[in-house]
Image (cartoon, coloured by chain):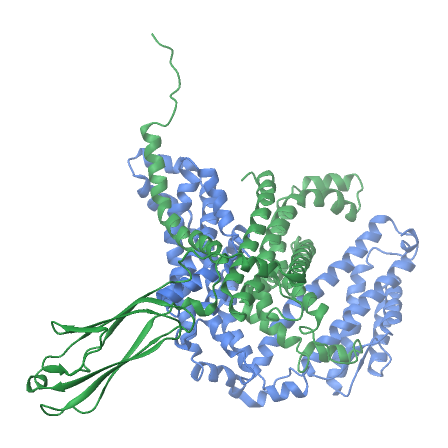
Chain colours: A blue, B green
Amino acid sequence: MKAVRFGYMTAPVLGALWCFVIAVTMAVAMSFATGAAFRPTLLTLPWGAAIGMAALYGAPALWGAALAAALAGMFGAGPMVSGDIGMLALVVGHGAVALFTALGLAKMTEELRPGALSRHEFEESVIRFLTGFGYIFFTAIVVIPFYVMVMTSLKNQAALMANPLDFSLDLSRGWHLFDSYYELLTQYSFGSYLWTSFYISVLTVFITLAFAIPGAYAVARLRFRGQAMFSRSVLLIYMVPMIVLALPIYIAFSMTGLRNTIFGIVMIYPVTTIPVALYMLQGYFRGLPSEVEEAGLMDGLSRLAVIWKITLPLSLPALASVSLYVFMIAWNEFLLAFMLLDDPSKFTLTRGIASLNSSEIPRQHLMAGSVIATVPIMLIFLGLERFMTKGLTAGSVKG
Amino acid sequence: MTDATPPTGTGPLGRREARLAWGLLAPTLIAVSLVVLLPLLAVFWISFKPVGLADLRPPTPIVREDIRGDLEAAGDKAVLRYRLRNSSQDQQILGVTLVDTWPDGLTPTEIDPRCDIAEGRLACDFGDWEGGTRDELRVPVTATAAYFDGPGAGDSDPIIDGKASNILTNLDFTLENFAQVFDGSEFWAVFGITLFYTVFGTLGALVMGLFAALLLNKSFRGQGFLRGLYLFPYVAPVIAVAFAWILLFDPFSGSANALLIQMGVSSEAINFFGERPLALIMVTLFEIWRYFPLSFLFILARMQSIDTDMYEAADMDGASPFQKFRYLSLPQLLGILSVLFLLRFIWTFNKFDDIFLLTGGNAGTRVLTVNVYEQAFALSNIGAGAAVAVLIFCCLLLFSVFFFKVISREEGL
């Protein structure tokens, strides 16, 4: 460890690693954007080391090294090599590799100098490297699957088979880019699935709240025997895996004719969410000052009136979080819908997507269906992120 | 004068409060016991029963009625024919009876000894039927003039009834299901796969979550955006992201394979979700990918509540960044990490959708939960599926004992 703690060791090592990270990232990004063959070479390591070393000797040296790397790249001797591509992609691709390498290294080596380093300076630069790597890594793993999902839905299967990396869009197709969405909505009745999913989720939210609010209030505020045991068993109950319950529910629904009915689904969904909602709400109710409620009681309100007039208005933010969380669970629910619904006229969105997974239906339809299911929940999530994040932290004891 | 003592037991107010509490809890209790406790009991019951998917429809007697010949004028002759069968090929039905309204003005010329016509009703008693029984009842009739005023012979549906022993409600029990589940090496393979998936899925998600939380535990522009973005895998419907992964890693048209080949990492396409050890690793990676946001959210929340004074003191003492993480942050986070570990462990153990969608349990990825589905629906053996479910439930009870021990220490719940 001691041996690395010299500027002339640390900077090139970090430089080589960082340049490798950037070259791989850019190669993947450029491949996905243009479909052309970009790939990092082993030359990334010496180039990175050189840029890292240069960074120790001030900005002019650093940018000079970066420029050299960019130019070398365009002639095939840089950190990344590219296949047969246009001038613009060539300049942008290699330029970006050099630029981001240099920017990152400038930041990492800010406190470094060629000689011996203190432990502080050394660790600070390593942390900066890890931070940069972390941002790229997490962003890449999160974005790539969604990018593939959206882009595939806008292309056609033949083009994807020919070059699986080419996600560039043929903008001349204009509105025909959205053909698979149009077909899903017209021929595969995804409009009705969307509506079914929506109203099932909304009903689930209301039914869940109707059950969970009084229950949570009782557990949080009222004294009765078995209270502690009760709040534990709530937790325990929502740890029971759905697949264990799905089997007898399937049997019971088959026998009573509730299978294939929306009514059956609306009956079963809230029960899967009531324990979560109850658990979240009781935590919140406990946090409310009980003095306010006692004041209400003293003024002659009944308990139920206290809940309605004092507790609920005070817990609107928590109710919003719980509602959103329950909505998300119901919207994303797959197992029960898959087992209990066979009739295409009653499918929810997730069940509808499952029915698209066959070799006769082109892939872009499957992905378009996935996008249709994902976009509403994402929009709600982005719009109400504050509530949603609260709800997730409070309630995601549930998987 | 007696000493003043505090009242013991519950007073009327306390009792009223308890009554109200149970009243408020009653709807939840009823709903939960109907949909959770009852099914749980049912699973235990079914796991001791030799029941297959086909047995869900109990055997019933079936009858079809038709008239051979035309009844157009008084004196016409015809044959009323009832074709009867047992819907099940192998189970018996006891005490089968048939009842049909007998139209006025129709005279039977000959009557089957098992049947009887009285008060405008044809009633027959067929006794017990073995599985696969087929029978035919023929009643030759002559029409009289009165027949043509009332409803015809075919207008009323015959009602047939019989008692079949329903496999789900009778008292036949068997240990066959458990024997089958524990049979051979397959069970241990499934168990091993479940453990691998659960342990590495949980640990991976925790470590990734910790890393992501460290990244975002500072304020900079775009922090909120990145936090939202990193939650996407968890918020999106599992079916959508699972199919996106399948597509991404497809051996023929997947982008991941194309990238690997282009970068020279691999020389030929890899069947990520179809090869034996690789498929299990891939589903575990998917699990980590999908659930790191959750650990990240929890850990970040905890990090932001750590007192900053401590770090300032450490700075004064000259602690390096790694030392601060190792000796200050980590001990503070240990509580939430252990709670998260247990929680995620249980939930990963219970996970069904993800693996079911990604591989369907093929290529060495069949965990216990997928095994329930596999046994019950793919192999049509509901009893064996229930036996696996019982096993899962027992494991869950075991875990939850640990869980409650830890969580009551950490959260004071």
Q: Nearer the viewer, residue B116 or A125?
A: B116
Where is residue A24, by image quadrant? bottom right
Please name the residue shown 62% across and 65% down the image: B366
Where is residue A137, by image quadrant? bottom right
Residue A281 in sight in this render: yes
Q: Measured along the vertical axis of the image, is residue A329 above or below residue A345?
A: above
Is B104 left or right of B310, judged from the image as shown? left
Residue B224 in sight in this render: no
Is B353 left or right of A121, judged from the image as shown? left
Please name the residue shown 35% across and 9% down the image: B2
Q: Nearer the viewer, residue A89 or A213?
A: A213
**Residue A127: image location, x then y, percent:** 77, 55
Image quadrant occupied by the N terminus of chain B: top left
Please name the residue shown 72% across and 41% down the image: B312
**Residue A36: image location, x then y, percent:** 73, 84
Q: Measured along the vertical axis of the image, is residue A55 above or below residue A170?
A: above
